[in-house]
Amino acid sequence: MDIYDREHLKQFLVTLFGQQAASWHPNEQLFNLTYELVEESGSCSEAIKYVPGPLGPARNAYKWMAREARSKFLQALSENRDHYTICIGAAAYRMVHRFQLAAQGV
């Protein structure tokens, strides 16, 4: 990795893990874990695309749910979002110890 790649990786890790990551030296192992993290959070992001929005007052729940599901599906097709913050945060929480070890070269 060149110096720019290392800096981008470090910025991403600090955003995700906080100031503890500022002292981590970006290396190939950290990059590989970051790739795994993004890959793991992808299935969560896919699922969140289909979570319905809030139900308005005095609405038929069944019709609303069907319309919301259809709308979310079509919206996902058109927008093709990458990853939701909550998904990548949850994956980071599960993997933090692996990142700490990788930063130490273990």
Image: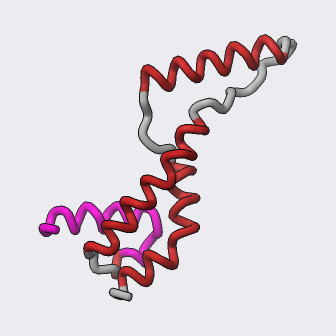
Say how the picture is coloured.
Answer: secondary structure
Image quarter in which the C terminus is found: bottom left
Q: How many marks?
A: 0
In the picture shown, does residue 2 fall above or below 55?
A: below
| Image quarter of residue 34 | bottom left
Q: Is residue 96 left or right of residue 61?
A: left
Residue reaching furthest to the left: 2
Dominant secondary structure (helix, strand or loop) of the stretch shown in magenta: helix
Q: Is residue 54 left or right of residue 79?
A: right
Q: Is residue 42 left or right of residue 10?
A: right
Q: Is residue 8 magenta?
A: yes
> Which residue is at a point 57% across and 22% down the rendered structure image?
73
| Image quarter of residue 71 | top right
Q: Which residues are magenta?
A: 1-21
Q: Is residue 19 magenta?
A: yes
- Between 84 and 34, the one lying in front of the other is 34
> Which residue is at a point 49% across and 46% down the rendered structure image?
42
> Which residue is at a point 56% across and 66% down the rendered structure image?
93
Image quarter in which the N terminus is found: bottom left
> Which residue is at a point 34% across and 81% down the rendered structure image?
23
In the picture shown, does residue 52 fall above or below 102?
A: above
The picture places residue 85, in percent across and down from the top left corner, at 51, 49
- Between 40 and 24, the one lying in front of the other is 40
The picture places residue 74, in percent across and down from the top left corner, at 53, 17
In the picture shown, does residue 34 fall above or below 39?
A: below
